[in-house]
Image (cartoon, helix red, strand yellow):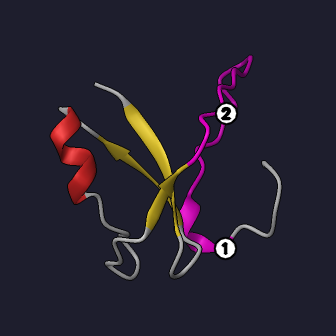
């Protein structure tokens, strides 16, 4: 079950969506504004040692550029 990262072109919210099949990608909406103008972002993989990793919470603030 792939998890994809998206960015809303209407409110700049970044979010993740779990897609169970390829047809679901047409119905992905922004969780903040409900908009459908979204783009899929390149996925970033990370690893941490010692269990001190953090999860990205995309809708708390708009991204200003680059990867975090």
Crowding around mark 2 (Cα neighbors within 10 Å: few <14, some 14 to 19, many 20+) is few
Who's the residue at 34% across and 71% down the image?
Answer: 36
Who's the residue at 57% across and 61% down the image?
Answer: 58
Total numbered labels placed on residues in the image: 2
Label whose residue precedes the other's in the sequence (2 or 1):
2
The stretch of residues the image draws in magenta is: 41-62
Residue in the foreground of this view, choosing between 33 and 21: 21
Residue in the foreground of this view, choosing between 2 and 36: 36
Image: 54 above or below 38: above
Who's the residue at 22% across and 35% down the image?
Answer: 22
Residue 10 horizontal side relative to residue 44, left or right:
left
Residue 20 seen? no
Give coordinates of residue 7: x percent, y percent: 54, 61
Give coordinates of residue 14: x percent, y percent: 55, 61
The label nearer to you, 2 versus 1, is 1
Residue 14 horizontal side relative to residue 25, left or right:
right
Say if the magenta span includes residue 53: yes
For label 2, the SS is loop
Q: Which residue is mark 1?
A: 62
Image: 8 above or below 19: below
Residue 30 seen? yes
Q: Which residue is mark 2?
A: 53
Give coordinates of residue 4: x percent, y percent: 43, 40
Residue in the foreground of this view, choosing between 56 and 43: 43
Q: For residue 3, which numbered disc appears in the image?
A: none
């Amino acid at each position: 079950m792939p998890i994809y990262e998206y960015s809303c072109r209407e409110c700049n919210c970044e979010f993740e969506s779990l897609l169970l099949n390829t047809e679901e990608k047409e119905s992905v909406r922004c969780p903040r504004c409900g908009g459908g103008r979204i783009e899929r972002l390149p996925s970033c993989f990370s690893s941490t040692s010692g269990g001190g990793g953090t999860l990205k919470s995309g809708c708390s603030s708009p991204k200003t550029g680059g990867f975090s």
